[in-house]
Image: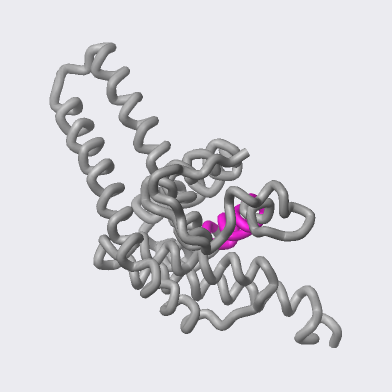
Amino acid sequence: MQLFNPDSKFSQFIYSLLDYIKLGLVFLLFSIPGFTAGAAAAAVMTVGMRIERKEAPTIFRPFWQAFKDNFRQGTMLTLLFMLVVGFLAADWYILMQMEGTPLIRLLCAVIFVLALLTAALMLWTFPTLARFQLTNRQIIHNAVIHMLSRFPQTLLALAVAVGGFILAALFPQVMPLITFFVPAFVVWYMSRTCVKRFRKFDGSKENETECQEFEPNRQADPAEPLQLN
């Protein structure tokens, strides 16, 4: 039957779905220690973007290689984000112990917005680490620009991730479904979005002039952050 032909669109969809489910599960597994989440995210995005570029890699060997390559820098960035999140969480806890005045409610709202922006920035920080060889300062600088340039897509990915977490907390019985499909969706959606966003910087002939200041996998100049259009 044509539907089950390995080259049919349906079969290709199933293969891709299984690949992204495996990537999501591998990400969760390698993120268990906490501080390894950044390296795991960079490795997952490395493989996910290769799938979207139709390079059809295997899953585990490229993941492990990318995990090792990005471990040091990914860990440093993860610890930085953990410090920011910890600071925001401590402020939130302190404010929650105070009387609920309009000023306190306003400060809580500000902290909530900052937490969402931090999470959105993380969605672009580790794909940028995966795709380009930059200093930590340049990665954060460029991740902010990528996030702002694709803000609606970023909010959608963030909403799915946060919504899945909330559903798992409220309805533990759906935890297996969320574990399988929510990380897979976020990896697929961000891989697809990042490939489209990064394509203008990949050094293709039609974009050669535009890409001269942002070449993938080149040695970064730590003294000057890259400027993106």
Which is nearer the eye, 132 or 223?
Answer: 223
Q: Is residue 87 above or below residue 131?
A: above
In magenta stretch: residue 13: no
Q: Is residue 183 above or below residue 23?
A: above
Query: Can you give x and y, in whole percent of width and height, for residue 7 in the image?
Result: 79, 83
Query: Can you give x and y, in whole percent of width and height, for residue 2 in the image?
Result: 85, 84
Display colour scheme: one colour
- Left or right for 207, reference 228: right
Q: Which SS does the magenta portion mostly show?
A: helix
In magenta stretch: residue 194: yes
Q: What residue lies at 34% left-to-right and 60% top-to-bottom?
A: 73
- Left or right for 100, reference 22: left
- Left or right for 59, reference 39: right
Which is nearer the eye, 180 or 109?
Answer: 109
Which is nearer the eye, 8 or 71?
Answer: 71
Query: Can you give x and y, in whole percent of width and height, for residue 34 in the image?
Result: 26, 61
Which is nearer the eye, 213 or 80?
Answer: 213
Q: What residue lies at 23% left-to-right and 13% top-to-bottom?
A: 101
User: Where, quadrant-wise, is the C terminus in this rendering?
Assistant: top right
- Left or right for 212, reference 24: right
In this orientation, does residue 35 appear? yes
Give the tally of numbered discs.
0
In this orientation, does residue 167 appear? no
Q: Image quadrant of residue 67?
A: bottom left
User: Where, quadrant-wise, is the N terminus in this rendering?
Assistant: bottom right
Outermost residue, right direction? 2
Q: What residue lies at 54% left-to-right and 71% top-to-bottom?
A: 47
Q: Which residues are magenta?
A: 186-197
Query: Can you give x and y, in whole percent of width and height, for residue 192 in the image?
Result: 63, 58
Q: Is residue 150 above or below residue 5?
A: above
Q: What residue lies at 27% left-to-right and 43% top-to-bottom?
A: 85
